[in-house]
Amino acid sequence: MPPFFKTWLTLCLLLPLAAHATNREQRLPSGFTGYTANADATVKRAPVQYRSTTTTLRTRPGNAAKQHAVGMQAVAMSPKQSSEVLSRAVNVLGTPYRWGGSSPKKGFDCSGLVKYAFNDVADVDLPRTSNAMAQGQGVKVAKGDLKPGDLIFFNIKSRRVNHVAIYLGNDRFIHAPRTGKRVSIDSLEKPYWQKHYVVAKRVLPKDQQALRLAKR
């Protein structure tokens, strides 16, 4: 093949490809390529800033929560007080439910039973309703950290707390269920109670609660 013809054939094949590549390079910088580069830079920076902020926000409450928990454990009920609370509650097993009741003779509703059980614990004066108890004195306790004597709260056919029980240990609790029932022992492992579980609290002596608030 003559050299001139060979050169001419090479140029015919390569020039369209070169032109296509040139046009592609010219279009991309003003469109997709330049925008993508900036976007990539932004995306890479954004998570670093968000993660840093998120970590800071999560770390501080976490540390505060740990310090808070340590302080609360120091002023929780003694084992003797806890035993007395459980003993009073268990001794009235079988007492009929009665709305507004707070004694073995008249019967119990859920909060009446709890108030009765804590009646002899010095410096503890619980509110009369379950919702008020949930918002009142004490410190929140994780479900996995429950101890005998802790109060557990539920919402039954309501968005608000409207039922309270006393934790006994081993996922069991004692409560006054509802009209037609009696004071009985039930299990937190039942799907019904898991579904309606709201929060748990460990009751604090009233003077220690006031002291904690004063130190804030």
Image (cartoon, helix red, strand yellow):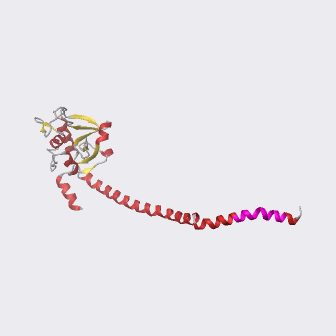
- Left or right: residue 196 compared with residue 176: right
Q: Position of residue 46 (x, y in %)?
A: 47, 63
Q: Is residue 195 above or below residue 56?
A: above
Task: Examine the image and state in which quarter residue 111 appears.
Answer: top left
Q: Position of residue 23 (x, y in %)?
A: 66, 66
Instruction: Kindly give the residue lying farthest to the right in the view shown.
Output: 2
Q: Quadrant of the C terminus?
A: bottom left
- Left or right: residue 42 compared with residue 150: right
In magenta, the rendered stretch is 6-19
Query: How many labels were placed on the picture?
Result: 0
Q: Is residue 51 above or below residue 196?
A: below
Q: Quadrant of the N terminus?
A: bottom right
Q: Residue at x 39, y 61 (%)?
A: 56
Is residue 16 inside the magenta stretch? yes
Is residue 173 inside the magenta stretch? no
Q: Position of residue 213 (x, y in %)?
A: 21, 59
- Left or right: residue 13 compared with residue 68: right
User: Which residue is more in the foreground, 4 or 143?
Assistant: 4
Q: Position of residue 169 (x, y in %)?
A: 28, 39
Task: Examine the image and state in which quarter residue 194 appears.
Answer: top left
Instruction: Kindly give the residue lying farthest to the left in the view shown.
Output: 105
